[in-house]
Amino acid sequence: MLLVGVVAVNVAVLRLNMQIEELGQQRLELEARNALLESQVSSTLAPARIEREARTRLGLVPAEESTYVELRPGR
Amino acid sequence: MTSRVVNRRIRLLFVLLSLALAGSLARAVWLQGVRAQPLSRLAAKQQRQTLELPARRGTIFDRNGVPLALGEQATTVYADPTQIQNARLVALAAEKALGLDAETIFPQLKDTSLAFVYLQRKADSAKAERLRKRELPGVGFYTEERRRYPQGAVGAQVLGFAGQDNRGLAGVELQLDDVLRGRPGRETVIRDPFGRVVDVLSETSERQGRDVFLTLDHRIQAKAEDVLRRTARQWGAKSATALVLDPSSGEIYAMATAPTFDANRFAEASQDKQRNRTATDTYEPGSTFKLIPVAGALSEGLVTPDSALTLATSIRVADRVINEHEPRPTVRMTVADIVAQSSNVGAITLGQQLGSERLASWVARFGFGKRTGLDLPGETPGLVLPLERWSGSTIGNLPIGQGIAVTPVQMAAAYAAVANNGVWVQPHLVGRVAGRSAARVGRRRILTPVIASQLATMLTGVVAEGGTGLAAAVPGYNVAGKTGTAAKPLSDGSGYSTSRYVASFVGFVPATRPRLVILVTLDEPTTIWGGLVAAPAFQELARFALQYLEVPPDNPEN
């Protein structure tokens, strides 16, 4: 019985080690995926890309520069 | 059958079984006793493996947390020619999947004296996966981190780049390589016959690279690069630089050089394009340097902004005669007029009143001839002639920004001191490392607040009617600044070119409560005047940055 118990514990440890290894691999894959998504987000934020998309896809033109006008009450 | 026959057969069977058992026992004793150690060593060699755990290189963010440089997973593809069964098949497969040239790689794949050849370092993982699915014998794969710059050319000269081995080679990547690269770990594992890890014998964890937040703003940086690109093209300039910084903190929002390059393709860019000219290149500043003799003369109490001087159209200093940039009769000019109209004769006169020693000390006080301490590699201190080597004509050159070589960073920092109430602040690019503020920034008072205020007021006269920098005016804001048009020295040292100039404009806005210092330089534009070519670039960049940062106007009626 003791022998059976020892064998069972060893098998459980082996299984856990393999699970840990698998989870480690998953973590690496998720980190890689995360980095790729961060990179894609940064690329989409690039001002040159935004301007290009605005012009070509949406047909927008650059806005006139803002001019500040001071409004005084009573006039 | 008689019982004797049966008994004999039973005894024979017993003997045979005993012999088999004895043989098994002997084999077991042989394997587990006599051969135990060599067999254990062999098993350990096959099952035990020590792996390096690579450290992730830290990400470089802009001030708002937008990643400018980060690591992506890539797959390095290699081949073992001794294991390849069909070299031509492998070459064609690699060409199709990875875009390589089959004719180029085929000779290496056929060479069985080699046990390892790279097919492609850090290939795109999706493309490598297509090749992996072919399961070609002799072709192997492993994961490597590839450095990627998602915004391409934005900030390329500032960021620098990391090479194939993920070590920083230029720019911030080099300056902060120790911080960014981390430290790999090690792990010794036992694998089963299927290659699965069943036990970890020892482990030293990797230390991931630390993330860095720069003071750059990617939008202001991109705008600066766009303005430079168009301005350089419009005026046929060889190159151009722009700096945008916060005078009170020294934080650099933008540090741009044109022409630029895509940081993801740094290996294809020329050395020229890779240089961060705002810190590594010098230029003779010309009239923007007139700030120094004026500041010195005011601070030493020799003049006030309203002091009037009688100025001829030219002035003789030793063996040189220096003229105004436009002919005029002898006039009386105030110090404020000298600044607004960029009078050469006026600036030299003030320099002469200061004298060589005091002028030299004011040049040093403003930080010229010394590195600013910028957190980038390759910053040059510029070239300042030591006082003991001044000739008789130096006092005629230096006040008008000739015979001295400065960097754009030094010049911007000098004007930032005026904008910051007389306190010079060290310009810097690194904001935070792993969440903690970067090292303390150097500060020193070089002007009294009163003198700084007087200078700021005089500099607003440059960007007003009658001033040389009217094209830098920004609607709704008071702008203080100075134009510069400096002839480039001839390479043989015999004098100055009459056709090659550096045009510049440096200023701060809003002048009454400065939020931004902006400097623009153009190298060898076809039209030479700073007020015509650099001032409009200043204006465009200032209008964008002020609106983007939501800086309220200080002169709404303008």
Image (spheres, coloured by chain):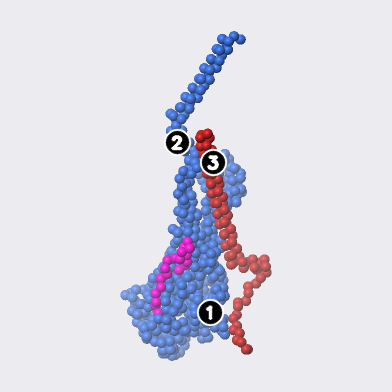
Chain colours: A red, B blue
Same chain for labels 3 and 1? Say yes or no: no
**Counting other residues with Cα less than 10 Å from the Cα at mark 2, is it few (<14), some (14-19), or many (20 or more)?**
few
Going from N to C along the chain, the mark reached first, 1 or 2, is: 2
Q: Closer to the camera, B319 or B315?
A: B315
Is B35 on the left or on the right of B232, as rendered?
A: left
State the CA–CA distance, disc 1 to disc 2. 79 Å
Is B68 on the left or on the right of B367, as rendered?
A: right
**Counting other residues with Cα less than 10 Å from the Cα at mark 1, is it few (<14), some (14-19), or many (20 or more)?**
many
Q: Amino acid at mark 3?
A: Ala
Point 57% across, 53% down: residue: A30
> In the image, residue B132 lies at what x, y percent?
59, 46
Q: Which residue is mark 2?
A: B41
Q: Is residue B550 above or below residue A36?
A: below
Q: Which residue is mark 3?
A: A12
Q: Amino acid at mark 1?
A: Ala
On residue B472, the disc is 1
Q: Are marks 1 and 2 in contact (CB under 8 Å)?
A: no
> In the image, residue B281 lies at what x, y percent?
45, 68
Chain letter of the residue beneath label 1 in the structure image: B
Q: Is residue B333 above or below residue B94?
A: below
* Residue B417 belongs to magenta span: no
Q: Which residues make up the magenta segment?
A: B428-447
State the CA–CA distance, disc 3 to disc 2. 26 Å
Same chain for labels 1 and 2? Say yes or no: yes
- Quadrant of the frame with the N terminus of chain B: top right
State the CA–CA distance, disc 3 to disc 1. 76 Å
> In the image, residue B309 lies at what x, y percent?
41, 89
Point 59% across, 81% down: residue: A68
Is B344 on the left or on the right of A63, as rendered?
A: left
Quarter of the figure with residue B218: bottom right
Question: For numbered disc 2, what is the local secondary structure?
Answer: helix
Instruction: Look at discs 3 and 1 and give the one toward the viewer.
Output: 3
